[in-house]
Amino acid sequence: MPMGMKHSPLFWAVGVLAFGAFQEHPALNSFFEQPQLKAPQTEALRAFLIQLRPQRGNLVLVTHQVNITALTSVVPSPGEMVVAAFEDDGRLVVKSRIAAPD
């Protein structure tokens, strides 16, 4: 069962169409035009995710390329999904990448 869906405000339609229910999360906002926000915003997102670790289920995050790259070091293609999970030692590890349909 999914734990929920969080997203950047820019992607609100994705939440409604795909999940019916969603919550905005400020750490998912793009910092493309404000690169000075990269470190604090990525740390805020990491802290949020670590806080959720004890819960069961999946969490879908809809965000921007800069956020995904800052968190995972992956540079995703447009529409690509990056699946990641925390290891026991606290490292976030990319488990899979799912390309967007053509």
Image: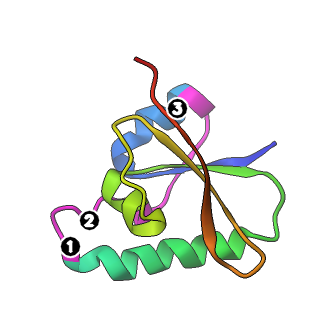
Horizontal and vertical percent position of residue 32: 21, 61
Q: Secondary structure at mark 2?
A: loop
* Horizontal side, residue 8 vs residue 58: left or right: left
Q: Secondary structure at mark 3?
A: helix
Q: Which residue is at a point 61% across and 33% down the rendered structure image?
A: 19
Residues in magenta, as a range: 18-35
Q: How is the image coloured?
A: rainbow
Instruction: Inspect the image, locate mark 3, and give the three-letter code of the amino acid beneath it.
Output: Val
Quarter-wise, where is residue 89 in the image?
A: bottom right
Q: Is residue 24 inside the magenta stretch? A: yes
Horizontal and vertical percent position of residue 15: 52, 37
First of labels 1, 3 by sequence position: 3
CA separation in Å, label 2 and label 1: 6 Å
CA separation in Å, label 2 and label 3: 23 Å
Q: Which residue is at a point 59% across and 73% down the rendered structure image?
A: 48
Q: Local crowd at mark 2 within 10 Å, few (<14), some, or many (≥20)?
A: some
Q: Which residue is at the far left? A: 33
* Horizontal side, residue 39 vs residue 3: left or right: left
Q: Are marks 2 and 3 in contact (CB under 8 Å)?
A: no
**Residue labelled with disc 3:** 16
**Residue labelled with disc 2:** 31
Q: Are marks 2 and 1 in contact (CB under 8 Å)?
A: yes
Q: Secondary structure at mark 1?
A: helix
CA separation in Å, label 1 and label 3: 29 Å
